Image: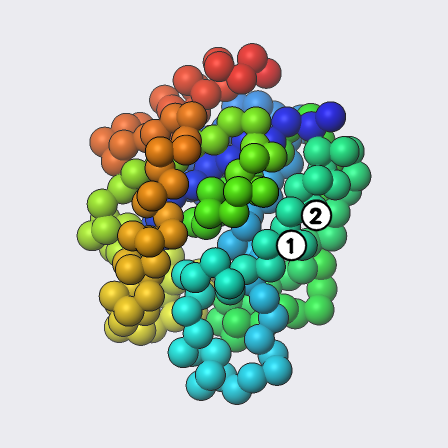
Amino acid sequence: MARLYGICGGSGAGKTTLAVELINRIGRDRVSALAFDTYYRDLSHISMAERMAVNYDHPDSLDNELFATHLADLRAGRDIEVPEYDFATHTRTGATIRVEARDIVVVEGILLFCFPGIHDMLDHSVFIDVPAHVRLERRIRRDVAERGRDADDVRRQFAEFVAPMHDEHVQPHRRHADRVVGVEEDLGRVADELVGKLAV
């Protein structure tokens, strides 16, 4: 049975960076990675203007049912097909990405701890606690470079949706983490510590 390790925190907190650090230390032949943020619901049935108004930081925006099913599959040793999501158009492309079942699955997502049924499946959980202004700067850099977004639109979305949803649906779950990582901590050193505790 695979072990599931979850990394949660606000947008731009460093979840993916820590996940990569862990994977590099454990070995890619033993670990799979799964991002909850790729499980947004398909919005191809509505106009782009309507898609732009959607609150993507609310739990309802994510297909948590499919995600939970996929986690259970990976734990049981079954490979999964993850829907490919286009962040620029807020739609699923119709293609899938295969994630192989391995000994360890590193799972990360903003709202990962928000759903009790999902959080309860995790064998170990980490929350990265980073101030809002730092997360906003990082999000602007990422979304402009990787997702084709406009910087002003990223700021608008952060103020309108990201920050209030973080306060309501993300930050309160900090208390459920087995390990809280502060902004001043080096994620490479944190990864070393976690790998030591995981006994991998």
The quadrant holding residue 74 is top right
Q: What residue is shown with label 1?
A: 65
Q: Regarding mark 2 in the picture, which secondary structure is present there?
A: helix
The image shows residue 167, relative to residue 122, as above or below, that is: below
Q: Regarding mark 1 in the picture, which secondary structure is present there?
A: helix
Residue 89 location in percent, x, y? 52, 75
Circle 2: is it few (<14), some (14-19), or many (20+) Cα within 10 Å? Answer: few
Label 1 amino acid? Glu
Q: Residue at x 33, y 66 (%)?
A: 161
Q: CA distance from mark 1 to mark 2?
A: 6 Å
Q: Residue at x 41, y 69 (%)?
A: 55
The image shows residue 22, relative to residue 35, as above or below, that is: above
Residue 75 location in percent, x, y? 71, 33
Q: Residue at x 41, y 61 (%)?
A: 57
- Quarter of the image where the N terminus is located: top right
- Quarter of the image where the C terminus is located: top right
Along the line of sight, the residue nearer the viewer: 80 or 120: 120
Is residue 14 something that shows in the picture? Answer: no
Residue 125 location in percent, x, y? 47, 31
Q: What residue is shown with label 2?
A: 69
Q: Residue at x 54, y 50 (%)?
A: 36
Verify CB contact (< 8 Å) between mark 1 and mark 2. yes
Residue 31 location in percent, x, y? 63, 30
* 101 sits to left or right of 42: right
* Mark linked to residue 192: none
Is residue 53 something that shows in the picture? Answer: yes
Label 2 amino acid? Thr
Q: How was the colour assigned to the protein in this rendering?
A: rainbow
* 150 sits to left or right of 99: left
**Number of numbered tags placed on the structure image:** 2
Along the line of sight, the residue nearer the viewer: 46 or 171: 171
Circle 1: is it few (<14), some (14-19), or many (20+) Cα within 10 Å? Answer: few
